Amino acid sequence: MTVALPRRATGRYLHALNPLATIAGPLPAMLALVFTRDIATPVTFIALGYLLLLTGARLSTSRLVLLFIALPVAAAILAVGFSLWTDAGDLDHSTTLLRIGDYHLYLSAVEIGAATALRLVSIVVLALLTGLTSSGPDLVRSAVAHLRVPYRIGYAALASYRFVPRFRAELDVIRKAHRVRGTMGGRGPIAAVRRTIGYIVPLLASAIRHAERVSLSMDARAFGAHPSRTERYELPLRTRDAVFVVAFWAVTMVIFAGLLFF
């Protein structure tokens, strides 16, 4: 018997939404941002994304660092890089910001670089509406239930994804074991390469053992033996999910229409 349980109570409305709603809402904006070339449009969606995250998501210190330090720094680095890589033949040469020998950095190149960087960052911020407010298992359950994704594919992909934290923990154990045995190999880049090579064999052996245990566990639960399976709980699409999606689409259309005509 499948039971419909509410999303975890966190006091933040984005956590109460179905993961598919937090994907479907920003998706049209993310697709449209790929084709924008101005600066105002991505900046507006970045502001919208930050507003939703700050008011509707539970943000830890590391997530706040990501939003207010890592992303701005990445945007600045990308803007500089794209400005330097822009083809000078397609630029407006009327305003020169920097001249080093025969190289000219034009204002138009900086504008193109900033627009491109902000476009990428705005897509990332909108994607974080799902990434910071939902979990992988909830997303898989919702996709299987509402998008008719075969559960064999969904849960197999989820099992593979969960290998990553497992490998991280195993690598930490292997490093500690090498440190206890005094086989760290000294300092410097050559020693670091040797240590990395030394981690490969035990990590591979651990990965094989873990894969065998996961396979036996799935076989014991008759995974894939039937065309469908029951769930411990389901994630239904509620009225609030539809309201969020429709409201986000409406805001997206208003933003694009307003920036287009004004």
Image (cartoon, grey):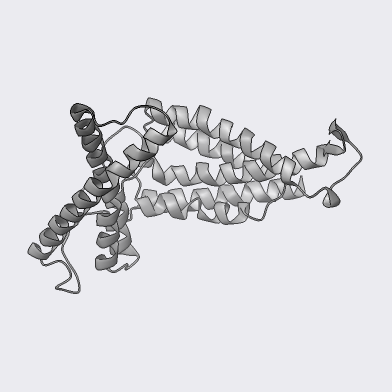
Q: Residue furthest left?
A: 220
Q: Position of residue 213 (x, y in %)?
A: 13, 56
Task: Report the side of 175 relative to 94 (left or right).
Answer: left
In front of the other: 182 or 19: 182
The quarter of the image holding the N terminus is bottom left
Closest to the observer, 54 or 211: 211
**Residue at horizontal 51 percent and vertical 48 percent from the top:** 248
**Whole-percent x, y for residue 53 in the image:** 45, 35
User: Image quarter for residue 179?
Assistant: top left
Q: Is residue 4 visible?
A: no
Residue sitting at 54 percent across and 52 percent down? 249
Nearer to us in this view, 72 or 36? 72
**Residue 261 horizontal side relative to residue 250, left or right:** right
Q: Position of residue 94 (x, y in %)?
A: 92, 40
Q: Quadrant of the C terminus?
A: top right
Depth order, front residue of 140/202: 202
Q: Is residue 151 visible?
A: yes
Indicate whether 69 appears above or below 38. Answer: above
Task: Locate residue 87, reporting x and y percent.
Answer: 79, 50
User: Which residue corresponds to the image point at 22% horizontal and 46% vertical from the top-left?
Assistant: 202
The extreme right residue here reads 94
- Residue 166 appears left or right of 213: right
**For the image shown, how many numbered marks are present on the structure?**
0
Is 66 left, or right, of 214 in this rendering?
A: right
The residue drawn where x is 63% and y is 39% is 78
